[in-house]
Amino acid sequence: MAIFSIRLPAFITGIIAFGAALVIGTPAGGGEHASFSRDVLPILQQHCGECHQPGGAGQQKSGLDLSTYEGVMKGTNFGAIVVPGNSFTSNLSVLIEGRARPEINMPHNRAPLSKWQRHLIRRWIDKGAKNN
């Protein structure tokens, strides 16, 4: 039986390693857990902050402030949007994954979050939605 040895250029090896990390699901900063401050909050600030901050249209309409951990965990005037440990039933996931009625999917009137961004938020919720 012949054994083949293939030497790949370093940049190709790097691309393969990066792709493997995406498939395996390593968060952007590495490690097993998604971090609220490192991974989730920047996504919320970039895609949701315009409306869901104190005084924003989304905050005034729903009561949801996504500018802080406390605001995320408080939820809306209608209840919690995060169920720690269960991203599937968390309304935050339902809204950003397009599983709600089309008129209330988020972000409203903007491009949807990327698959990777949605994955990080789900992972953070599934790991307990900690203030980390």
Image (cartoon, rainbow, N blue to C red):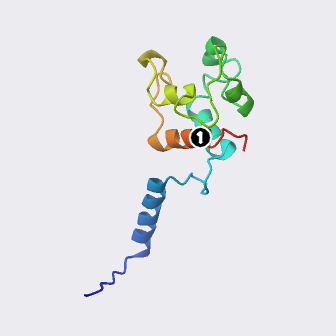
Q: Position of residue 124 (x, y in %)?
A: 61, 42
Q: In the picture provided, is 2 more to the left or to the right than 51? A: left
Q: In the picture provided, is 1 more to the left or to the right than 117? A: left
Q: Position of residue 23 (x, y in %)?
A: 44, 54
The quadrant in which the N terminus is found is bottom left
Task: Please state which amino acid type lies under the numbered disc 1.
Answer: Asp
Residue sitting at x 63%, y 43%? 127
Q: Is residue 101 above or below residue 73?
A: above
Question: Could you tell me which secondary element the residue under label 1 belongs to?
Answer: helix
Q: Position of residue 64 (x, y in %)?
A: 65, 20
Q: Position of residue 36 (x, y in %)?
A: 67, 41
Q: In the picture provided, is 36 more to the left or to the right than 100? A: right
The image quadrant that residue 90 belongs to is: top right
Q: Pick the residue in front: 33 or 58.
A: 33
Q: Residue furthest bottom?
A: 2
Q: Is residue 62 above or below residue 48?
A: above
Residue sitting at x 26%, y 87%? 2
The residue that label 1 is drawn on is 126
Q: Is residue 114 above or below residue 7?
A: above
Q: Pick the residue in front: 40 or 50.
A: 40
Residue sitting at x 45%, y 15%? 103
